[in-house]
Amino acid sequence: MNFGRRIGFFFLFIVGLAEVKAQQTLQPGFNLPEYLEVLRISGYINDTSITYEKPPAPLQYKLEYRSPETGLMNQWDLWLRNDQKLAVINLRGTTQDLASWLENFYSAMVPATGQLQINDSTTFTYKLAESPDATVHVGWLVGIAHMAPSIAEYIKTYRQRGVKEFIVSGFSQGGALTFLLRSWLHYQTATGQLPADIVYKTYSSAAPKPGNMQYVYDYDYITRVGWSYTVVNALDWVPETPFSLQSLKDFNEANPFINVSGALKKQPLLARWYLNHAFNSMGRITRRSQKRFQKYLGNTVYKQVKKFLPQFKAPTYAPGSNYMRAGSPIILMPDEQYKKEHIFNGKNIFLHHMPSNYYELAVRLYSK
């Protein structure tokens, strides 16, 4: 990093430090100092898949616990604020290990309610949405299946110590995992498995898309009115993944496409033939594409996943790949200064995915 960048980054740190307000109870709404602190926590872990400039160290929190690696190289931290009233559950992003990358590529969809047999003696029963049509990314669900039970135990332990507020955070793959974890915590609370007086807030940074529209509707509803934010650098490609495909079956039941043939009966013969042919052709294309998605991103990747999780049983995949974004968006729109300082050279594909870049843009664009 050149001297100018060092000075600029130091300035951003000072601005962030100056904006740390008095410690207070969690409130709905995007809070820049609050977000910068969880971004410091997410970015301070140095065992992710790329070498990058770190944001400054956390200012108000101390690391209380780091879990062992589990599943497909998943790990989570618990950080406690200095006043011991608020904790952050931080989920690690992708590491350099093949197993961690396989978790991302294992992107067939499964129902948002069901079971995963993660080994011969353990079945993870989960609910992440009300709708039977809601589906989620199977790889990240595998990650949550390995971490969620221990996270729940720590939440209950710290609740007994008087901690009733938790921020769920993560960067990149960790950001994707935050969506599924937050959904799981909601429905665990609804069934009495977790204390009902706990308040959760979620910050998902640089996160890919976690599930289909029905899942996203559910997630955005349970975190409505300012309790979940997804922060995206507009030049970052990671939040545009996984590959997505919308078919005619992905619409709600009441739609004009459900009975195209009947709707076209009053049209002239030639128009009716042409439009029927067009809709049938589009339907065949999406069905074929969906089968390929499921074959390669489900069955084929599963064979590689099984090398790391030999007792994991392949679930029944859902027929769809209609991935959508979740959470209230906070867009980091790069300005001319940013573009001059961060130039893509054809090789630095993670250029706009750096936690330090998110930190830089968040301070510059939202501190006012």
Image (spheres, grey):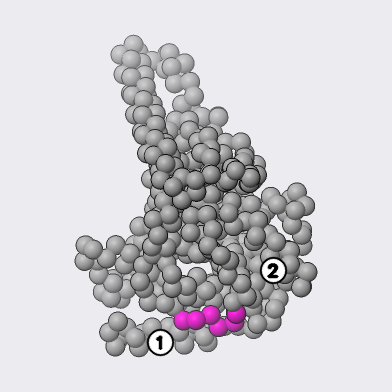
Residue 63, by quadrant, is bottom right
Visible residue check, residue 199? no
Residue 97, by quadrant, is bottom left
Is 172 on the left or on the right of 27, as rendered? Answer: left
SS class, disc 1? helix
**Which residue is situated farthest in the left direction here?**
345
- Please tell me which residue is depicted at 36% across the width and 67% down the height of the picture: 50
Does 179 appear in magenta? Answer: no
Identify which amino acid the numbered label 2 is placed on: Glu
**Numbered circle sitting on residue 165:** 2
**Which residue is situated farthest in the top direction here?**
269
- Image position of 57 with respect to 287: above or below: below
Identify which amino acid the numbered label 1 is placed on: Phe
Q: Quadrant of the N terminus?
A: bottom left
SS class, disc 2? strand
- Please tell me which residue is depicted at 38% across the width and 62% down the height of the picture: 96
Q: Nearer the viewer, residue 167 or 110?
A: 110
> How crowded is the residue under tag 2: few (<14 C-alpha within 10 Å), some, or many (20+)?
some
Mark 2 vs mark 1, CA separation in Å: 31 Å
**Numbered circle sitting on residue 36:** none
Residue located beneath label 1 in the image: 10
Residue 115, by quadrant, is top right
- Please tell me which residue is depicted at 34% across the width and 11% down the height of the picture: 269
Q: How far across and how far down the image is residue 228, in percent?
A: 58, 60
Q: How far across and how far down the image is residue 210, in percent?
A: 50, 50
- Image position of 16 with respect to 260: above or below: below
| Segment tinted magenta in the rendering | 56-62
What predominant SS class does the magenta segment belong to? loop
